[in-house]
Image (cartoon, rainbow, N blue to C red):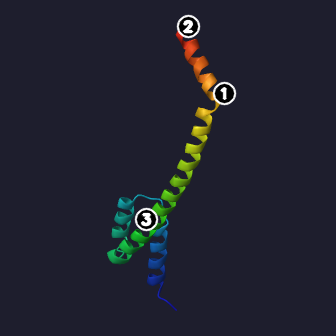
Amino acid sequence: MRPPLVVSSVASLAVFVFSPLPSAQMFMAAGLADIPLLPLAGAFLIGRSISYTIYVTAATAAEETVHRLLRQGLTSPSAIAIQLASLAASQFN
């Protein structure tokens, strides 16, 4: 059976890996809790690598979708007609 300190340290590192809290506050809390820095830094690297990979993947998918929707919406004949009608109406006001 593992000592409670090791289990609590592993649990703390797991929370740190998947926590959305800013890193400065997490490192300050780790310092106050007297957690060793090397495992914490490793957990930080792993957690940020995973979360940033997810962010980049989601942003890439969103960019492709938004680009396609804007291209379809702004270049369709009805969208061009509405834009021209809006420009013409704004000239008479």
Mark 1 or mark 3: which is in front?
1
If you read the primary sequence from the N terminus, does the residue marked by circle 3 or circle 2 appear first? 3
Whether residue 19 is visible here, answered yes or no, is no
Q: Residue 21, located in which quarter of the rendered image?
A: bottom left
Quote the CA–CA distance across marks 1 and 3.
45 Å
**Residue at image coords 34%, 68%:** 32
Tell me the crowding category of disc 2: few under 14, some 14 to 19, or many 20 or more residues within 10 angstroms, Cα based: few
Residue farthest toward the bottom in the current orientation of the protein: 1
If you read the primary sequence from the N terminus, does the residue marked by circle 1 or circle 2 appear first? 1
User: Do residues under tags 3 and 2 come within 8 Å of each other at their CB atoms?
Assistant: no
User: Which of the pair 90/37 is nearer the observer?
Assistant: 90
**Residue at image coords 43%, 71%:** 46
For this view, does 28 lie left or right of residue 77?
left
66 up-or-down from 38: above or below: above
Find residue 69 and report its horizontal and vertical position in percent: 61, 41
The amino acid at mark 3 is Arg
Which residue corresponds to mark 2? 92
Q: How many marks?
A: 3
Find residue 19 and report its horizontal and vertical position in percent: 48, 63
Q: Secondary structure at mark 3?
A: helix
The amino acid at mark 1 is Ser
Q: Residue 83, located in which quarter of the rendered image?
A: top right
Q: Residue 75, located in which quarter of the rendered image?
A: top right
Which residue corresponds to mark 3? 48
Mark 1 or mark 2: which is in front?
1
Mark 3 or mark 2: which is in front?
2
User: Do residues under tags 1 and 2 come within 8 Å of each other at their CB atoms?
Assistant: no
The amino acid at mark 2 is Phe
Disc assigned to residue 78? 1
Q: Secondary structure at mark 2?
A: loop
User: Which of the pair 45/73 is nearer the observer?
Assistant: 73
